[in-house]
Amino acid sequence: MTREIVFRRLTKKESEILTNEVRNTPNIVAVPINRWRSFDKMFVFEDEKGIGGVCALDYFGKDWAEIADFIVLPRLRGKGIGRKLFDKAFGYLKIHQYNIYIVSRNPLVIGMMEKAVFNIYQNFFQMPWPVIWHSTKKTLNLAVMTEFVRKLFVFRKKTSLVYGILRKEDYGKNLD
């Protein structure tokens, strides 16, 4: 049985699977199918049944990257796959000396941010300007806004987003 994380581009079918799964996941706002396809490469967990989870890296500004569009399919949740994907992405970005940004409302992801000693923000406008600009551009997408509103009514989720920043000059403070 092969279970591994690879760094590659998604197929169209995999993008469709993930888009449908995100629609049923309350903690992820929206990822349109064309966004999945826009990533040249991402960390992909594969097993004998195919794709099991992904973690995309979204580069912006001079030296910033977002650990973005991070999901594990339900059949593999609770097995440490999300942690492995996060660790791969986090390690890759540290080696390449990026400032790292994450936004989530998922308690497990927030716990990963805290363990990795990210600076945690509750207020979007406390973030550095490159992050505000990047996030605003990403959000000003009709498909994302429509899905955001749909999820407000379907899931009635009241949990706020949490923003995490780890600047490259703070890597030495990491407890790992």
Image (cartoon, helix red, strand yellow):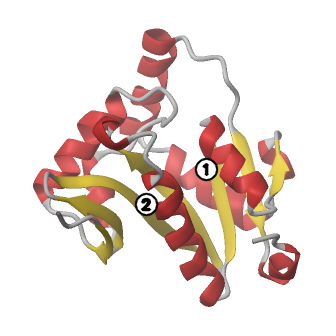
Residue occupying the far bottom of the picture = 96
Of residue 41 and residue 30, the one placed in the foreground of this image is 41
Q: Position of residue 164 (x, y in %)?
A: 74, 54
The residue that disc 1 covers is 136
Tell me the quadrant of the picture where the C terminus can be found.
Answer: bottom right
Q: Residues within 10 Å of mark 1 (few under 14, many from 20)?
A: few
Q: Residues within 10 Å of mark 2 (few under 14, many from 20)?
A: many
Query: Is residue 40 visible to us here?
Result: no
Earlier-in-chain disc, 1 versus 2? 2
Of residue 82 and residue 59, the one placed in the foreground of this image is 82
Q: Position of residue 45 (x, y in %)?
A: 32, 61
Q: Is residue 94 above or below residue 109?
A: below
Residue 108 is labelled as: none
Tell me the quadrant of the picture where the N terminus can be found.
Answer: bottom left
Element under disc 1? helix
Q: Is residue 36 above or below residue 94?
A: above
Residue type at the position of mark 1 = Thr
Element under disc 2? strand
Q: Is residue 20 above or below residue 65?
A: above
Say left or right for 140 vs 31: right
Q: Position of residue 112 (x, y in %)?
A: 67, 53
Please give the name of the residue rendered at 37% of the width and 57% of the height, measured from the top-left corner. Answer: 54
Residue type at the position of mark 2 = Cys
Q: Position of residue 39 (x, y in %)?
A: 34, 68
Residue 55 is labelled as: 2
Please give the name of the residue rendered at 42% of the width and 11% of the height, measured from the top-left corner. Answer: 154
